[in-house]
Image (cartoon, rainbow, N blue to C red):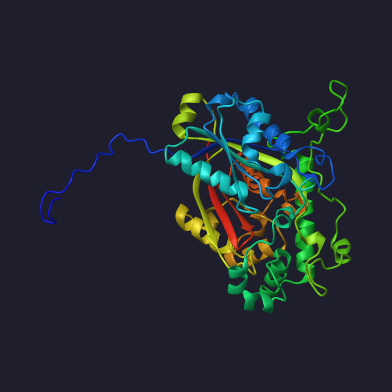
Amino acid sequence: MSSPGGPQPRRPRSRGLVIPDAVVVDAVRTPVGRRGGGLSGVHAVDLSAVVLRALVRRNHLDAADVDDVVWGCVSQVGEQTANIARSAVLAAGWPEAVPGTTVDRQCGSSQQALAFAAAGLVAGQYDVVVAGGVESMSRVPLGAAGQVGGAPYGPAVHARYRDALADAGLDTFHQGVGAELMARKWGLGRGELDAFAVTSHQRAAQALDSGAFEDELEPVDPDALIPGGPGDEPHHSVVSVDEGVRRGTTAEVLAGLRPAFAAEGLLTAGTSSQISDGAAALLLTTSEQVRRRGWRPLARVRASVVVGADPVTMLTAPIPATAKVLRRAALTLGDIDTYEVNEAFAPVPLAWLAETGGDPARLNPRGGAIALGHPLGASGARLATTLLHRLRQTGGRYGLQTMCEGGGLANATVFEALD
């Protein structure tokens, strides 16, 4: 070994080295179905296969070229267990050689799948990769995973947060109560929360009516997917639009709803995300592969982060995640044309606005999970899909999305649109 003052080892030259990036070629989603609605008869594996097949068709993709499928799913029990990513690949008719893995970062599972896929591209592990996710909350109910094999979290975690849980009137962690705590901390009133929900429905309805979602939606024909369906007979059950949008919702209607999580609470079913079914997928590659294949990409993944925060209030992490991802991207919020902050509950985006000073007009401009629904494992990919197509349609340059997640986590991602 050389001494500190002696000859130093040569470093490899970087001249001519191509540093891979991660770009999104396409993003597609199913309509979001209401609980018990048009998609409730479709197995989550088959719902996933719908968007995988759509990526092949829309991009003249040879599925054999896909190095991996990274798939988000939250309730990995029953029909959604046994590595649903792998089953989705097989159900889509893709070659058996295409692998798949399933990710659980709670509500941000498919956004984390996207981050893992992008990191794999930058690391040179992938040339072409698919990221996305699915959740059928009609068939695998919310909380089903916690009903199998005992309670989650464990005694050490409960002991660590015993006092904070007691102060919140809880014996375990609860997202709805966390949303109540946020509303009180940021001084949000019932009328403000209801008004935000109305705006979400209005924006979603306007987007539907204007055809803004057409580029991202892949209709689903449940009759063609359910075993024993009518086969070649005419189908009348095609789901082609999001089912949760309530066009007649008003502040007066929402004011009549009872609190959902506390007797004197502020949150109702109307100011909470909808329980839903859906799937979404993104095709990612590098700029070098784009040139070789003649694809026209939507955007580059400029930066991606994940952070942790207080798990009792649980839903505040999008605020520090936004600050961190903007630093990583060397941007300010003023540079961002559109931001998607998942509407798990109305206080989440409202507190985010208050802390970041964001422009309400740029926040969830096509509605959010309160109107469109929140199929847990698919939502991160759904937000990205809507965001990226809006950037393309409006000529915006930068987009940001962030998701609160169980356990006091949040992902945040910045995209840079490409011509």
Identity of the residue furthest to the top in this view: 232
Is 289 drawn above or below residue 255 in the view shown?
above
Q: Quadrant of residue 176?
A: bottom right
Q: Quadrant of residue 344?
A: bottom right
Residue 48 image position (x, y, % from top left) = 69, 36
Looking at the image, residue 252 sits to the left or right of residue 407; the answer is right
One can see residue 397 in this view: no
**Residue at point 60%, 27% (across, down):** 59
* Total residue callouts: 0
Identity of the residue furthest to the front in this view: 149
Residue 302 image position (x, y, % from top left) = 49, 47
164 or 212, nearer to the observer: 164
One can see residue 120 in this view: yes
**Residue at point 68%, 30% (across, down):** 91
Residue 105 image position (x, y, % from top left) = 60, 53
5 or 26, nearer to the observer: 5
Residue 309 image position (x, y, % from top left) = 56, 66
**Residue at point 89%, 66% (across, down):** 256
Is 228 drawn above or below residue 306 in the view shown?
above
